[in-house]
Amino acid sequence: MVGTEEATSNNLKNTTPNETMRVPSSDKVINLDQGDPTVYEEYWQRMGDKCTVVISGSQSLSYFAKSKSICWFLESALEDSIRQLHRTVGNASADDHYIVVGTGSTQLIMASLYALCPPDRVQPTHVVAATPYYSCYPEIGSFMRSTLYEWAGDAKTYKGEGPFVEFVTFPNNPDGEMREVAVKGTTEGKLVHDLAYYWPQYTPINVCANHDIMLFTLSKCTGHAGSRIGWALVKDEVVARKMIKFMEVTTIGVSKEAQIRAAKILEVVTESCPSLGPENFFQHSRLIMADRWKRLREVVKEMEFFSLLDYPKSYCNFANVYSTTQPAFAWMKSDENKIKDLEKHLKGEKILTRNGNRFGTESNYVRISMLSTNEDFNIFLERMLAMKETMEAVQYNGI
Ligand SMILES: Cc1ncc(COP(=O)(O)O)c(C=O)c1O
């Protein structure tokens, strides 16, 4: 799927480790388009063999998992570690929900649409999200040209009649805002709460979320995007069973190897939580995100051409500190519309970002991943500062 969070072949060309070694930093293309969570690599390297799992040739031959769950392909070790992690972090009420595992939460977005859109309607059910919305929702909503559902755009201005599905992303991708339901004045809507970023490194945990459908992903929680594991917490058994049916028909379940690995990783993260030192995963990643945001804000302030959103402080029940949201993406704006196509401008500086128009807004906005390697993040900041001089020298009438 071109243009989703996954790396496209073009972008990958610029970021393979071998090439990183060869390309001088001044020539290196810095890919901050996808939210590829390589920032966490250093932590997991330090953890050494703690998450190593050995899977013998005689293991996991069956399609089925030995589990009591209605999700017949869900490994019980993964179910236990998901429930335990939510109890420890306090970000979502998992114990009174069914768990449906998916190949990333991307597959669960599709499964939730299948489950929530009535099959007997003449018109497809509308799918909406408030702008700026996660760029994959419109792609998923229209890609299959389904007769079940169709993408209908901005939830804030939606005036449709009949049933609809609204995605509420909390905190939001791309702008980090703590979102509430945007379509008002109707009870016809079904909600999917996408909580991919509701973890302590990105935002204070001050409510234990308890919605009908809540989506999470290993990618943004621990950084293991390549394992392709996501999970949905689903209140209603009928909805959960429909989502399970979707997984059955599309992929006959989810890789057991990936689930076993994910179970181990989540267990290690949970076990790290009582620690006060750098082995505490969330504490470690919270400090890295805080440092990156501080440095980016300093550079943006110094440049005077761009702006970032400010986020209010609140108390994090998990970390026991007051802090602000420090999102996985920076939502950067060219002030006074000086640069009309900011993505194009940054691309000229060999910095790949995602254009505001992909999120239903204007091209003077870009989304910048804050989850890259340290090296790439440092080069990005250096290049931004170097840009200041060239930008000051030029009279911008729009590019
Ligand atoms: C808001 C949101 N939801 C869902 C996903 C999908 O994540 P994955 O398919 O890697 O689990 C992402 C990925 O970036 C996201 O930002």
Image (spheres, grey):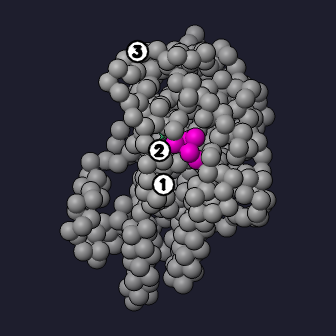
Query: Any atom of ligand 1 within 8 Å of the CB at mark 2?
Result: no
Specify the segment rendered in magenta.
265-269
Query: Relative to 278, is 55 on the left or the right?
Result: left
Residue 76 against residue 177 in the figure, above or below: above
Majority secondary structure of magenta residues: helix
Query: Relative to 275, is 383 on the left or the right?
Result: left
Point out residue 233 in the picture as x, y percentages from the top left corner: 64, 30
Task: Name the residue tied to disc 3.
Answer: 62
Q: Is the C-beta separation of discs 2 and 1 under 8 Å?
A: yes
How packed is label 2: few (under 14 Cα within 10 Å), some, or many (20 or more)? some
How packed is label 3: few (under 14 Cα within 10 Å), some, or many (20 or more)? few
Residue that appears at 24% across and 74% down: 24
Q: CA distance from mark 1 to mark 3?
A: 31 Å
Residue that appears at 22% across and 62% down: 19
Task: Name the residue tied to disc 2.
Answer: 51
Q: Classify mark 2: helix, strand or loop.
A: loop
Q: Can the viewer see residue 358? A: no
Amino acid type, label 2: Cys
Residue 397 against residue 208 in the figure, above or below: below
Task: Name the residue tied to disc 1.
Answer: 47
Q: CA distance from mark 2 to mark 1?
A: 8 Å
Tag nearer the camera, 1 or 3:
1
How packed is label 1: few (under 14 Cα within 10 Å), some, or many (20 or more)? some
| Count of numbered labels shown in the rendering | 3
Q: Can the viewer see residue 33? A: yes
Is residue 266 inside the magenta stretch? yes
Point out residue 246 in the picture as x, y percentages from the top left corner: 49, 18
Q: Is the C-beta separation of discs 1 and 3 under 8 Å?
A: no
Q: Classify mark 3: helix, strand or loop.
A: loop
Is residue 77 inside the magenta stretch? no
Q: Quadrant of residue 238?
A: top right
Disc with the residue nearer the chain's start (2 vs 3):
2
